[in-house]
């Protein structure tokens, strides 16, 4: 296992694989399939101050190699997450990254302040990029100054490092990344979903009750890789990469682009065992490619490197 | 326990126009608890289509470790599924959800099973299990048109069976509700399109009534919140049930359809 | 055929299906497969003032349900296009939409002025959104004021209506659309490709020699639909939609979203007969869905409608 | 003429480690003009993988309307291709490109055919056609390792055949170039990895030399400009050739490799 361990602000990861927020609930369902302690970390579902029901259904639609979702941040609310979900998760030896969402700045601050005190929460993920909530959300994720100020204010109250989750729905992702870095972010997570849509052939109306939704899955992988490639060269804080990952090969590709760890979202729906499978396959793939440790892959696309290990052999 | 298993296809055949009957060999049959549960099928290794397809279990043969599904060829996923032949393998996740409660009735009582279109299949195993308990069973099955009718004989083996078609090309013209109103029963179990479920719930909400719901799904196991519906007691609030893991079968009045 | 005809500024289309720019060369190769007169129109490859070789190879990479390209606007130059490609195309009964590209404003103006005089060029498509050229290109497509001024200046010199091709790599596509509409655009074409990337597992380096490339194909369809849905409600000029179209069903979905015609790009590589096949299948699909004419489908997702024809039956 | 055809698979078998020989029945054999032409295969109906895969024609049987390809299972597309069995259909576009000119040699002259890895297959049909013309043929075939070697016997039937492996596990250890330098020939035909082609072109640019190039492709027919290479006379200019439609075989010195 020592070929996969990674240290990031607030996080000592056994391996760099974690389920992405919103694609793993609070872990209970997947604990039927395997021991959650196997995971590098868990990014739990977005938490808001008050419980939310979210959007009307249908909330998902399928696309070629992707899916749209418009869950709308359904969650049981801060109190319940702290009193019940997080304590349940504490039975596992796995750091939790709490995804923090809201409509106005004060919401984020309130959630961040409380949830960062939970003993198994090792980092926050500021969700400034959810495309499925009408107010707030997306605005925070598209205006650099707004994102920066939010980051700064959340940093003031958080007891753990703060990662900011970037939206891909922007003209200039590097500008956004630099803004939140300047705001004090300890790391970045990217990408959230691309805004997309499907129409029903019979009715002519949008398939999603919310009209539009967030596109995830293999379809968005090239966009995620490009953005991580650009951002990781422009900032000094680490990037947790996500967007369409479904195999050990994908993980290496994200590391090459510049990610320091990765999250797996949609692929959990296709294969509930995807995270442990990737964790098991990574060392074999590293062997094949001639790396001793996965960290050697990081940023390889833009860093100058000496010979690869397997060239030395 | 939910399993993910590569299951061998024992047989697949088209039993009505675009309606396929698919039998697989699977260890997961041992985990099946009740009629009305479903499985989540990955129809192809490729990521196009990406998501699994939810299909109900229509009958179970634990002795031979087999179970059968009946589905309609609709879109991309079920069209690919329909191309699979005997001996091929299918990636199946299941059994999922909670099925119809068969213990709601005592021997000698009458169950009315009402199915619409591809809501019919799960009622077949239900019928088998009710009969095994000594319950009398009446079936009312609604289809669009004659060519879509399936399993009439199979249902007749277990009890009175009424068929309706929307266009009147077979059985009685009209909707299942036209038939139900003339029947006596102690408990009604139903599965089918939402408008049908709504009509039945409106009429028989005071009776013992169980409905199986359909909703677009992501994970199928309760993790993604794609398939939620509101609790009836709290229509404007945040209470919810998940169709995949709390349902797909609900007692009338439990959730807002 | 009268169920498919569409009139747009400068264009009387037999049907609303045309190959997208860059995916059909100047038509010669596809004329081996079918009579090009069958097409609604042809969007020819981007033309620049001088001949261009484009980017080094590899220029394409595959992604799930998509592909990346970094051709880099290779083309034989304005003179050759006017003296040889366009005259060759004039043997077919099909209007040509000339895709106009450049690095600076003057380039666009020069190409537009000359090429719009060609007798079979019925409209221009201003390519302000090519992600694969270092200077110009993308900048025109991401800054509303710049796009607006370019549109205005090209309109001054063009002898035919001008469509502006929008880039999806922006925070606010509606703002871009409104800007070029105010600049005098007669129509919009959208979307161009999303910027993406793939890395080579063995070397760790980008697969494309150009590092990044433009993502096209079914993967981007939901993004295209969403943007057309938003834009078509916000402007009064027509939208020619594109992005992942490969079937008659897709065409209807784009019409529902708000497109008035569509272009087919990447799918030509998968099936050289895709355009005529779609044209043949559309009337059958219209029957099935209960429409007399394809124009009834336009904007159905956001327009209020009476009963569908098949509901009346 | 280029055709797009659904071709029936006559046979497919693994002839070396990850190397498959695939024979299909296709009317498009009648359009095949020269050895070294290739086809563009859609391995699946799904859009993942999206693009066709270019594979060379390795031998042609016009009498039976069949042709054969040999390919290596590498990534997503060829892995899917390797799963196809006899009787299944394959969507093939071809024949594409221009092949090796067999008329460059007169009866009695000697052709040297040099292949590397999956560059070997198109040389097989070339050998057949040269022999038929009365040309003497020598083969030099390079592979990574013993388990990757294929078609040694088949080539031996037509002429002297030298095998090299990079790791020395079979034939002579080393590269094809080590062997070539000891051989006499009137014309050299070669297909294989770019470094091999470069080495050969450097050494033998003064000889009659034809090289088959590889490049990532989109359309395969000359429309997308994915596969261009620069003309040798104009290395910094805008002249180009398309590997798919002007190639894949070029005369040495025609294009920059
Ligand atoms: C609990 C449950 C049990 C079911 N049991 C059966 C059964 O026994 N037999 C049967 O024929 N059908 C059944 N269905 C419906 C079946 O899941 C859909 O017909 C099928 O998913 C359509 O997929 P497609 O690839 O043909 O269509 P596509 O249009 O390609 O599907 C696109 C996406 O929409 C989803 N979708 C489309 N229609 C439905 C629908 N009606 N319900 C849920 N998701 C849908 C698909 O799962 C997929 O994610 C059941 C649905 C649920 C929720
Ligand atoms: C003219 C020509 C003839 C060829 N003939 C043969 C042959 O006879 N036998 C054989 O085994 N191989 C041949 N190749 C190489 C073959 O096309 C690739 O091995 C194959 O495309 C790899 O696809 P994949 O799905 O396995 O890999 P993936 O990695 O999934 O491919 C991803 C994308 O890259 C492209 N690609 C990857 N490697 C290559 C490559 N080496 N050349 C061109 N495109 C590539 C694929 O076509 C696809 O678009 C030929 C290539 C060309 C250009
Ligand atoms: C059903 C669903 C729900 C999601 N919910 C959240 C969420 O609550 N908070 C968040 O930051 N991201 C959420 N996301 C985005 C994912 O965390 C991830 O960024 C995105 O899906 C890309 O990764 P993937 O392609 O691996 O799914 C959600 C995605 C999906 C598919
Ligand atoms: C190989 C290739 C070359 C392209 N060249 C051009 C171009 O020269 N000018 C342009 O405006 N768009 C160009 N495009 C973009 C397409 O016209 C189209 O907008 C995009 O590919 C989305 O449509 P699709 O998914 O159907 O391919 C190119 C796309 C591809 C794949
Ligand atoms: S489908 Fe994911 S919660 Fe029901
Ligand atoms: S592959 Fe399209 S031009 Fe050669």
Image (cartoon, coloured by chain):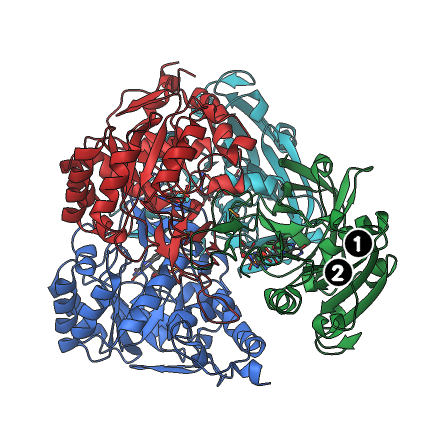
Chain colours: A blue, B cyan, C red, D green
Q: Looking at this view, name the residue that lies furthest to the front.
A: D206
Residue D213 seen in the figure: yes
The percent position of residue D147, horizontal first and vertical second, equals 75, 70
The image shows residue A223, relative to residue C177, as above or below, that is below
Callout 2: residue from which chain? D
* Label 2 crowd bin: few (<14), some (14–19), many (20+), radius 10 Å: many
Residue D175 rendering spot, x and y as whole percentages: 70, 74
Relative side of A149 to C53, left or right:
left
Q: Chain of mark 1?
A: D
Q: Is residue C253 above or below residue D133?
A: above
Q: Disc 2, disc 1: CB below 8 Å?
A: yes
On the image, the x and y values in percent for residue A11 come to 33, 81
Where does label 1 land, which residue? D127
B30 displayed left or right of B238: right
Q: CA distance from mark 2 to mark 1?
A: 8 Å
- The residue under label 2 is D113
């Amino acid at each position: 296992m020592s070929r996969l361990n990674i240290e990031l602000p607030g996080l000592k990861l056994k391996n760099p694989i974690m389920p992405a927020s919103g694609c793993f609930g609070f872990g209970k369902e997947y604990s039927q399939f395997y021991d959650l302690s196997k995971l590098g970390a868990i990014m739990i579902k977005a938490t808001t101050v008050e419980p939310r029901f979210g959007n009307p259904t249908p909330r998902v639609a399928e696309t070629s190699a992707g899916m749209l979702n418009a869950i709308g941040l359904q969650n049981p609310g801060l109190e319940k997450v702290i009193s019940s979900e997080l304590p349940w998760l504490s039975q596992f030896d796995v750091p939790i990254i709490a995804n923090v969402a809201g409509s106005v700045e004060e919401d984020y601050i309130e959630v961040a302040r409380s949830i960062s005190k939970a003993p198994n929460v090792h980092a926050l993920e500021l969700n400034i990029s959810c495309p499925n909530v009408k107010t707030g959300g997306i605005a925070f994720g598209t205006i650099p100054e707004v994102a920066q100020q939010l980051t700064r204010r959340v940093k003031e109250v958080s007891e753990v490092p703060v990662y900011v989750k970037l939206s891909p729905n922007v003209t200039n992702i590097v500008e956004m990344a630099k803004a939140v870095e300047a705001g004090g972010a300890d790391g970045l997570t990217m990408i959230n979903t691309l805004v997309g849509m499907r129409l029903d052939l019979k009715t002519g109306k949008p398939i999603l009750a919310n009209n539009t939704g967030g596109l995830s899955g293999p379809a968005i992988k090239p966009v995620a890789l490009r953005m991580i490639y650009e951002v990781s060269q422009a900032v000094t804080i680490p990037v947790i990469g996500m967007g369409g990952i479904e195999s050990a090969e994908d993980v290496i590709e994200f590391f090459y682009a510049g990610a320091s760890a990765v999250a797996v979202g949609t692929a959990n729906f296709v294969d509930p065992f995807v995270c442990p499978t990737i964790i098991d396959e990574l060392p074999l793939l590293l062997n094949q490619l001639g790396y001793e440790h996965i960290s050697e892959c990081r940023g390889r696309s833009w860093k100058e490197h000496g010979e690869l290990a397997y060239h030395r052999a | 326990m939910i399993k993910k298993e590569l299951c061998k296809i024992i047989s697949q055949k088209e039993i009505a126009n675009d309606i396929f009957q698919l039998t697989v060999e699977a260890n997961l049959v041992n985990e099946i608890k009740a009629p009305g549960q479903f499985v989540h099928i990955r129809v192809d290794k490729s990521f196009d289509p990406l998501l699994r397809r939810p299909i109900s279990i229509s009958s179970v043969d634990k002795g031979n470790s087999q179970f059968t599904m009946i589905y309609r060829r609709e879109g991309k996923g079920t069209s690919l599924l329909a191309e699979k032949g005997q001996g091929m393998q299918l990636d199946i996740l299941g059994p999922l959800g909670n099925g119809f409660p068969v213990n709601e009735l005592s021997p000698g009582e009458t169950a009315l099973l009402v199915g619409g279109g591809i809501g019919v299949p799960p009622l077949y195993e239900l019928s088998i299990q009710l009969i095994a308990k000594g319950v009398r069973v009446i079936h009312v099955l609604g289809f669009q048109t004659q060519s879509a009718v399936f399993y009439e004989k199979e249902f007749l083996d277990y009890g009175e069976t009424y068929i309706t078609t929307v266009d009147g090309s077979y059985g009685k013209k009209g909707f299942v509700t036209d038939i139900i109103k003339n029947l006596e029963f102690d408990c009604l179990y139903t599965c089918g399109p939402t408008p049908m479920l709504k009509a039945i719930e409106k009429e028989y909400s005071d009776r013992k009534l169980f409905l199986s719901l359909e909703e677009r799904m992501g994970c199928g196991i309760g993790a993604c919140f794609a398939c939620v519906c509101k609790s009836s007691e709290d229509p404007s609030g945040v209470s919810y049930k998940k169709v995949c893991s709390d349902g797909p079968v609900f007692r009338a009045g439990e959730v807002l359809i």
